[in-house]
Image (cartoon, rainbow, N blue to C red):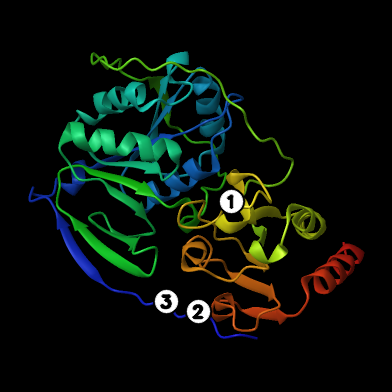
Amino acid sequence: MFPAFCRSSAALRVKYGTSVLANSRLASTLVFLESSKDGKIAQSSMSALTAAAQLGFPIAALLAGSSASKAAEELKKTGGSALLQQIYVANNEAYDHYFAENVTPLALELLKEPEYTHFVVASSAVGKSILPRMGALLDFQPICDITKIVDSATFVRPIYAGNALATVKCLQDKKLISIRASSFPAAAASEATNAAISEAPQSSQVSELTVKWEGENLVKSARPDLGSASKVISGGRGLKNKETFDNLVTPLADSLGAAIGATRAAVDSGFCDNSLQIGQTGKVVAPDLYIGLGISGAIQHLAGMKDSKVIVAINNDQEAPIFQVADYGLVGDLNEIVPELTEKLSQNK
C-alpha cells in the first residue's frame, strides 16, 4: 500500500468587496437548477441545492426551459431540502439550451429583490457561462468552484490546479457562487416539500447579441455519468493505443458498473472521446473508487481526481508519480494484471 498523497494547503484569506453584510434575518438564497428535456434535474444542480442548504437561509429555486414545470413538480415531490420554500418556473423554449444571454436577465430579475443575498449554481458549463456575466452586470466579484462553505460569508476554493486552498471572505451584498459538484453530495429525496410553484418574473432586459442554436451531437452511453459516478476506471498514455484501451478499460468498467475516464494524453492520442477527459482542463471527479491504468500521474490529471475516496494505480513504472497519491498500487504488465483482475471481479458479480 502506497502512502496517501499529502497535498500542500495554503490558507489564503481574501476579502471581496467592502459592502456591509445584509441582515441575516432577511437573507435568502436563489439557486439555479438545470434540467433535462424529460424534466430530470441534473445531478450537479442537486449538489448545488445541498450547498445552498448549508448556507442556512430559506431557498428559492429557479428552473427554466420548456420542461421547467415538469422538473418543478418532480422537485416538489422529492423535496431535497427542508429550506426550499419557493420554486420559480420560466416555461419558455428560449431557455432550453441555457444561453447566458437569455438566462442571465431572468435570474437578475429575481436578484433585484434585496432579500436574495446569495446566488448559487453548479460549476458546470452552464454555471460557468452564467456567473461571469451576472458578476459583470451587477458589478460583483463571483466566487467560483468552491469546495466548502465555512459560513454564509466564508468559502474555500482550490487554486493553483488544486495544490492550494484559498479561504475567501466575501463582504458583498450579494454573493455569486459556483460550487464544485464533486465536493457536495447531491440532495437526497426526502418528504414532499410545501414550496410554492410560481411563474418567474419576466425580464425587461433584452440582449443585443443574437444567438442561434444550430444543433448538437451527443455521445450516448448506458454507463454512469462520469461526473457523478461512484466508480471510475481511467486509462492513460501507458495503454499505447485505442485497441488496448478498449480491450482493457471497457471490460474492467463493465465488471464494476463503472464510468470510463482518461487522461488528456490518452484523449489527444485518439484512444477515446474528449468528453471522457479528467483533469485540470477536463472533468473533476471524486468517486468512491478510482482505478488508473497506465497513468503516470501528471499534476494536471491529479487535479481532476485526487479527491477520490480510494485510488488504485496499475503501472509498470514503479517511479510513476501516481503512486504518491494512490492508496493501493500494482507494479507490472497491464496486459497481464488487468485481464486477470477483470476475470476475478466478473466471477464475484
Residue under label 3: 7
Q: Residues within 10 Å of mark 3 (few under 14, many from 20)?
A: few
Out of 230 and 317, give the one closest to the viewer. Answer: 317
Q: Residues within 10 Å of mark 1 (few under 14, many from 20)?
A: few
Out of 292 and 145, give the one closest to the viewer. Answer: 292
The three-letter amino acid code for the residue at tag 3 is: Arg
**Residue at (27, 27) in percent of width and height:** 110
Secondary-structure class at tag 2? loop
Q: Is residue 189 left or right of residue 65?
A: right
Q: Is residue 92 visible?
A: no
Quadrant in the rendering for residue 285: bottom right
Above or below, 222 against 315 in this view is above
In which quadrant of the rendered image does the C terminus lie?
Answer: bottom right
Out of 90 and 248, give the one closest to the viewer. Answer: 248
Secondary-structure class at tag 3? loop
Query: Earlier along the polypeptide chain: callout 1 or callout 3?
Result: 3
Between marks 2 and 1, how big is the CA–CA gap? 27 Å
Nearer mark to the viewer, of 2 and 1: 1
Residue under label 1: 268
Query: Earlier along the polypeptide chain: callout 2 or callout 1?
Result: 2
Residue under label 2: 5
- Disc 2, disc 3: CB below 8 Å? yes
